Amino acid sequence: MPSSFDPNSSDVAHENFKKVTIADAVGKALSMLFRARQLPEYVRNSQIFIQFEFQLEKERDQLPLWVPVGIGAGIASWFLLADSHFWTAFIALCAGLAVFVKLIGQGTRLGSAVFWFLLLLGVGCAIIWLRSWSVATPVLERPTVASFYAEIEKIEVVSARDMVRLTLDTHEKQDLPPRVRVNVPIDKAAMDLQAGAVIQLRARLMPPAMASLPGAYDFSRRAWFMGLGATGQILGDIKVVEAAEPLWGPYSAMPEYRQRLSNHVQLQMKGGAGAIGATLATGDRGAIKDEDAEAMRRSGLAHLLSISGLHVTAVVGAVYLLVIRILALFPPLALRLRLPLVAASCAAVAALSYTLLTGAQVPTIRACIAALLVLTALIIGRSAITLRMVAAGALLVLVFWPESLVGPSFQLSFAAVTAIIALHTHPKVQSLFARRDEGIWKRFGRGILALFLTGLVVELALMPIALFHFHKAGIYGALANIVAIPLTTFVIMPLEAVALLLDTVGLGAPIWWICEKALNSLLILAHYVSSSPGSVTMLPTMPLIAFGLLISGGLWLALWTQRWRIWGLVPICCGALIVATNRPPDIYIASDGRHVGIRNQAGELAMLRTSKSGFVRDILLENAGVDGEARALDDWPNAQCNADSCSITIEASDRHWHILATRSTHYIPALALSAACRRADIVISERRLPASCQPRWIRADRTFLQQVGGMTIDLESQQVTTTEKHTGRHSWTRFKDPDKPVRKKPMPNRASQGLVIAPQ
């Protein structure tokens, strides 16, 4: 038996004790390092933090409304950053900040709200990144003329321009993008051109057009998400190689039926009435003349031409009331069936059918989703019209079509609905417009006041969006909508539906006549309002920071319910101040170098080329905020022009600026060109200028414009804004690499009137 006393046992125990002590110390240090930390006590006890916690606790039911806002902000960040390295860094930053906020803000509602919002920012960026990758297709590099075979995917009749648009599938052969779109003159569009047919054609194809100026409409971005790799014009005739399969084969009958229905409506009602009637029935806007469409935009009635909430609501409401009233006439059915369930089911089928019939565009899909949510709420006995319904619809659209966020359709649609619901859920507004026992004239006046106030709030909500995208907004839209909305909802659409129903037995002609008169009244109203003095506000390109402040302030004002919602006026006022004090550029140079606009100190705009038509020219006028025609540069003081060039002297920033712009392709002697360039501060040309042309400041020739796109110049601050800087280098952009050599072509040797030399 071993002795109970071991001389070495104390040393062993001492060593074991030291090991345990060290291990405990290390474990405690690690636990101190990695344990969840809380906000410092002085922060938690600060008055500002307590107020935020108190307000968020009262607004806890409103917090889910910010989910689509977070997703949308992440999507917008993806468009602004425009580089995969930045996208990765942004997502990682959002995730890291979310973890940090989660650790320091445990147990607080503010910490939880910020944590989820940061996560949603990263999720939104990832969603649009994945979407852009999934739709990526080859894009035509340069204009070309090609003969090829293709299968027709989609047919759009644009009768207002006497043409038909064909979306073609090339099956990724013949060295062409997999999907192209060509315009065909309507006289060359044979009856056997149907979806599914295989055709042979020759066309001039071009890459999708990029934005001509910073902030202008960018078709290349839209074409990227549509999968279009080229657009063009047909040359010669089209040969049908293989006829389309029967309608009920792989291709649905809906597009063919939509076109037939549109043609039928236009046959029953002539002129603009038939075009707008076809739009209300099928969503086909191709027959609307440009002057009618412009009048609708200027009068604030353009939303009637976009099948969205108003139209879907009218269809759903009519079907719901009609079904429930008819079934109520039969007591056996009324006693055995849940009439709201049956009526809501029929209305849901009508909403889905109408959405498919009108082409299933994003506003229509949003309105259909909202209608289905409303019908579901009616069935289960819940409140139907809420901001949560709008948030659910926005979230669904952003998840499946995230690119729609930057388009005017999504923004206008959701801004209008959000403004209407936020207005009518306010307690004071509800009290003002609540039903009460009063005379018919008071009730009528209260309804008119509600309609006017709703129109006014909607106009205020839509004005910054319209000014940002279209550079114009109607002033009298609220008054015009008082007449137009009831006329469209309660007169025109029901008459059109009844007429189509009676056409099945050949008795619709009288109803079509009444409907045509009502539609003509709508057009008369639009033209009268649009032509009234001061009916339209024009604005040059709005700074992006101002637009962001206006939108964020509007969201804060609409989504909260407590008194702190008034804080939303702060960013709104800041954005409005930036817009009001924003100085428009002095020089506008389109990406083609052909269209140049110059503004003088009086705010007048003169253009290098004054053709009466042209897409780029119209874009330049819109971005400059000019309503009407610009002056010719030839007629300006301090301008000397001939057939080859113009030399202009303008005063800005306490000095005179000399600008030289060429406008012909005639041969110019190198010595004369070099001398003229040295005398100018800015040289603008659609041609490639030689290296010997060295102006004092900027040489905006074809080579430079292919690298940066269109540009604007503010001479007061000497700030140059380019399309490349505004949009970034996304996948759909085709800016040239400045390091890549440019292959030059010989200049045609034709007679020239010579350069106009800028004065010293």
Image (spheres, helix red, strand yellow):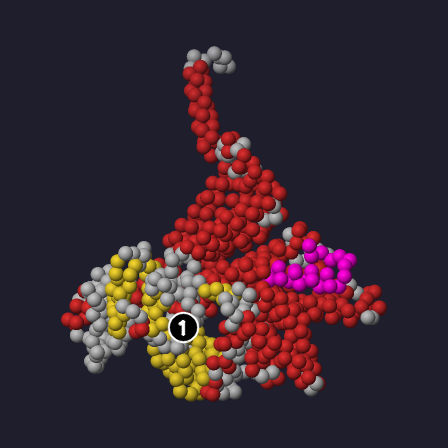
- Residue at 48% in and 64% down: 537
Q: Where, by quadrant of the figure, is residue 108 drawn?
A: top right
Q: Is residue 528 left or right of residue 447?
A: left
User: Observer-nearest residue: 531 or 137?
Assistant: 531
Q: Report the residue at 34% width, 77% height from top.
A: 144
Q: Amino acid at mark 1?
A: Glu
Q: Residue 590, image x and y in percent? A: 34, 68
Task: Say if the magenta span includes residue 215.
Answer: no
Viewer-nearest residue: 458 or 477: 477
Q: Is residue 14 above or below residue 560?
A: above
Q: Residue 453 lies in magenta, yes or no?
A: yes
Quarter of the image where the C terminus is located:
bottom left
- Residue 279 in view, yes or no: no
Residue 392 image position (x, y, % from top left): 59, 57
Q: Is residue 31 above or below residue 307?
A: above
Residue to which mark 1 is pinned: 629
Residue in the picture at 62% in, 84% down: 268
Write the start and end of the magenta stretch as one range: 432-455
Residue 444 position, x and y percent, is 71, 64
Question: Which is nearer the eye, 561 or 539?
Answer: 539
Q: Is residue 656 left or right of residue 1?
A: left
Identify the secondary structure beneath mark 1. Answer: loop
Residue shown at 75% from the left, 63% from the top: 440
Q: Is residue 529 left or right of residue 621?
A: right
